[in-house]
Image (cartoon, coloured by chain):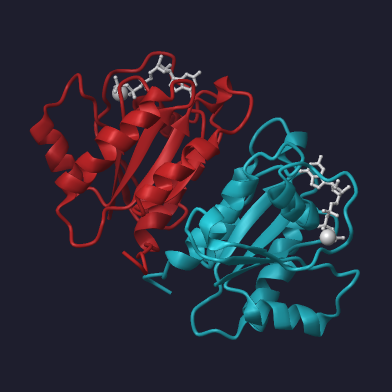
Chain colours: A cyan, B red
Amino acid sequence: DIHILLLGERRVGKTSLILSLVSEEFPDDVPNRVEEITIPADVTPEKVPTHIVDYSESEQAEYQLCEEVGRANVVCLVYDLTDLSTLEKVKLKWLPLIREFSMQDNMLPVILVGNKSDLIPDSKMYEAVPIMNEYPEIETCIECSSKTLTNVSEMFYFAQKAVLHPTWPLYS
Amino acid sequence: DIHILLLGERRVGKTSLILSLVSEEFPDDVPNRVEEITIPADVTPEKVPTHIVDYSESEQAEYQLCEEVGRANVVCLVYDLTDLSTLEKVKLKWLPLIREFSMQDNMLPVILVGNKSDLIPDSKMYEAVPIMNEYPEIETCIECSSKTLTNVSEMFYFAQKAVLHPTWPLYS
Ligand SMILES: Nc1nc2c(ncn2[C@@H]2O[C@H](COP(=O)(O)OP(=O)(O)OP(=O)(O)O)[C@@H](O)[C@H]2O)c(=O)[nH]1
Ligand SMILES: Nc1nc2c(ncn2[C@@H]2O[C@H](COP(=O)(O)OP(=O)(O)OP(=O)(O)O)[C@@H](O)[C@H]2O)c(=O)[nH]1
Ligand SMILES: [Mg+2]
Ligand SMILES: [Mg+2]
């Protein structure tokens, strides 16, 4: 089974992304956190049962975050494309924290997710590349919108793919 | 050194992508094919000398294509986001041809590149996912525009990254 954990600053859209995937529509009202969701093997592109785990700083303590990172096979690290301070926090807070808590021999793979693409006119992927350079555990980056459902299922597909076809740095 | 080869149907924008990267502006008139371009190590994000190789069916025979695939470390397989028959050809013609000609023990990594994103209102990445599922040598996909320079250097960065941090399928 695959455990996908969503992390990132408050209000970037973690819970909305999960609910958009499951309901195929944008939820107007979202709780801070949704319970773990299990997607049966036959409806996932890679045909593996997949658990999607939400995280919310407003509801969970740091030891719970540490436990969730320990159980995860991949992290979707979400930032808000309209608020690049959330990308700065990806670099300064979340990626170091994931390294610290993951305790694996291999690095825990990360998908970097720019959400709310409906609110920006053009891609900002160039902002993510320097961070990908610094942290080779970032498999890839993707821009999506839970509001327009753009690239939402693709994001979860990239996460599955990162677990099933992992990348090992040659030089590190 | 890294050899990046651009392949795909005619008129999808291979030569324009290379010239946009090099000149940082969209070339109005492009030849069918440009000569191999070498990017020195110090200006590439991964700090490795990188050769970029164009291909044009109008100017090259199939045996030359076979040779180029043999020398390549990664292929950027380009299609036109405004003409999805070029994506169909990626699946039916180009990916099988790359497998046939690459003759490596490991599969030659491929980056799937949807070009001319300036001409479409929203991402069409969902069209690429079924193909990524079928061909695990596709490391990732990206949408770009050589006209607006959107994600052009990012595309070449993904190609470099695919060579330096390759993916091996766990189950294949
Ligand atoms: N325009 C737009 N708004 C979005 C999108 N995704 C989420 N939002 C809005 O952003 C706000 C925060 O979304 P949440 O899903 O609660 O964010 P979260 O990351 O789960 O936040 P916490 O649980 O507090 O950590 C809500 O008002 C959402 O409606 C999006 O893709 N586009
Ligand atoms: N709007 C738009 N037009 C583009 C873009 N990239 C290329 N074009 C146009 O598409 C046409 C074909 O571009 P080329 O770069 O010659 O394509 P190619 O893949 O090298 O074609 P062949 O050499 O024949 O295989 C030209 O008219 C370009 O100006 C783009 O990103 N946006
Ligand atoms: Mg939430
Ligand atoms: Mg050409």
Frontmost residue, B161 versus A36: A36
Instruction: Identify the residue at horizontal 67%, vertical 77% (top origin).
Output: A69
Answer yes or no: is residue A117 visible. yes
Specify whether A3 is left or right of B172. Answer: right
Residue A51 in the image: above or below residue B103: below
Q: Quadrant of the N terminus of chain A?
A: bottom right
Answer yes or no: is residue B37 visible. no
Instruction: Identify the residue at horizontal 89%, vertical 58% (top origin).
Output: A31
Residue A88: x and y in percent read 74, 58
Quarter of image, res B171: bottom left
Quarter of image, res B6: top left
Residue A122 in the image: above or below residue A158: above
Residue B3: x and y in percent read 27, 48
Quarter of image, res A7: bottom right
Give the number of marks: 0
- The residue at the far left in this view is B63
Instruction: Identify the residue at horizontal 8%, vertical 34% (top origin).
Output: B63
Frontmost residue, B133 versus B29: B133
- The residue at the far top in this view is B29
Residue A95 in the image: above or below residue B40: below
Q: Quadrant of ligand 3?
A: bottom right
Residue A3: x and y in percent read 61, 71
Residue A21: x and y in percent read 69, 50
Q: Quadrant of the C terminus of chain A?
A: bottom left
Instruction: Identify the residue at horizontal 58%, vertical 23% (top origin).
Output: B120
